[in-house]
Image (cartoon, helix red, strand yellow):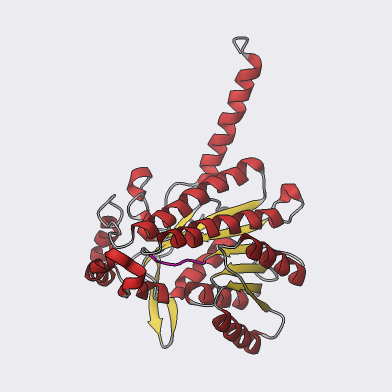
Amino acid sequence: MEVEGKVALVTGAAQGIGKAIIRELLENGASVSLIDIAVEKGEEYKTLLDEEFGEGKAIFIVCDVTNQDQLTDAFQQTVDHFGKLNIVVNNAGINNEKNWEKTINVNLNGMIRGTYLALKHMRKDEGGEGGLIVNMSSLAAHTCTSGLFSRSHFIQRNLAPAPPPLIATQSGSRACTKLSQPNQQDRERERAAHVPGLMPAAHQPVYTATKSGIIGFTRAIAAASEVGQYGVRINTIAPGFVNTALLQSIEHEENMGEYYKYEANIKEMMNHYGILEPLIVAKGVIELAENDTLNGAVMKITVSAGIHYEEYGPQYQAKICNSAISDFFAHLWTDASY
């Protein structure tokens, strides 16, 4: 998919990763709908974007993703304003172990609501034009589960020989990316992160559960899209620690509750694995948009390995599933025992 000329809706768009995604989409020629509950931040960012990219390229809609009516209206406003919808990024998220039900409602339920609304507007089998959905997960989920299902690799999935991985670096006030080969120590750290249970997120079990749920839901709905021929690709991004306000939530007892006492532990993990800048996550969204072969992919982003993918691919899983369903019914119709 060419991003230029497309319309994207991003939740949690007024801060952190969402802000970076919005800017990257605009720089690649898309029009954007900023969805966020933070009124002042959203309006300020919209004004800044108007000055930089021109009025009419971005709209801001105040919306709480836990409110079905508000989110439904936000999607409809976006389509009414721009005339179409091609890309949806379900990025809104919080980290609040004390109010864990809210964390589930924002992170997991909000993502599910956003995915179903996106499908409502984009499914080709229901009159839409197709498109892309990206759901934001986290390595907090993946490091505890990936080894149970598959092995990961460090190279990007390209038909051509893979280049060295992208590494996040800091340049002035903005992050940039450069091509760099991780050293042996980096590789050892990366491998360690994929041993099940070696790096459990002891300080945020509910947050981890929501991010695990995002991966499971995304891969399942991507398989459904493949089998049902929705014409919509659905992928997830699981970054490591990212330099956002969410990362600072561990320093506040009102967020972490009884797990506040593990603050030192998580800071040690940050020092060990490093912290990404939001820009590289935003670039991951662009890559998922431009690579039409990716459906149900889990893009992982770390300081040592940059952008890379989990080995399994739902395109294979979906084809196997589709074939199995066809074989089952063929057997059902031809076997007299039924």
- Where residue 96 appears, as percent x and y from the top left, is 39, 66
Quadrant where the image shows the C terminus: top right
- Where residue 63 appears, as percent x and y from the top left, is 61, 70
Quadrant where the image shows the N terminus: bottom right
Residue 228 appears left or right of 40: right
Residue 302's image quarter? bottom left
- Residue at image point 63% right, 64% down: 71
Q: Is residue 167 visible?
A: yes
Query: Relative to the observer, which residue lies in front, 7 or 248?
Result: 248
Q: Is residue 169 above or below residue 48?
A: above
- Residue at image point 67% right, 48% down: 230
The range drawn in magenta is: 92-96
- Where residue 129 appears, as percent x and y from the top left, is 73, 56
Residue 300's image quarter? bottom left
Q: Is residue 303 visible?
A: no
Residue extending furthest top?
336
Residue 192 appears left or right of 3: left
Query: Relative to the observer, which residue lies in front, 80 or 178?
Result: 80
Query: Relative to the observer, which residue lies in front, 160 or 333?
Result: 333
- Residue at image point 49% right, 47% down: 313
- Where residue 269 appears, as percent x and y from the top left, is 26, 67
Magenta: main secondary structure equals loop
Query: Relative to the observer, which residue lies in front, 130 or 251?
Result: 251
Q: Is residue 71 above or below residue 57?
A: above
Residue 52's image quarter? bottom right
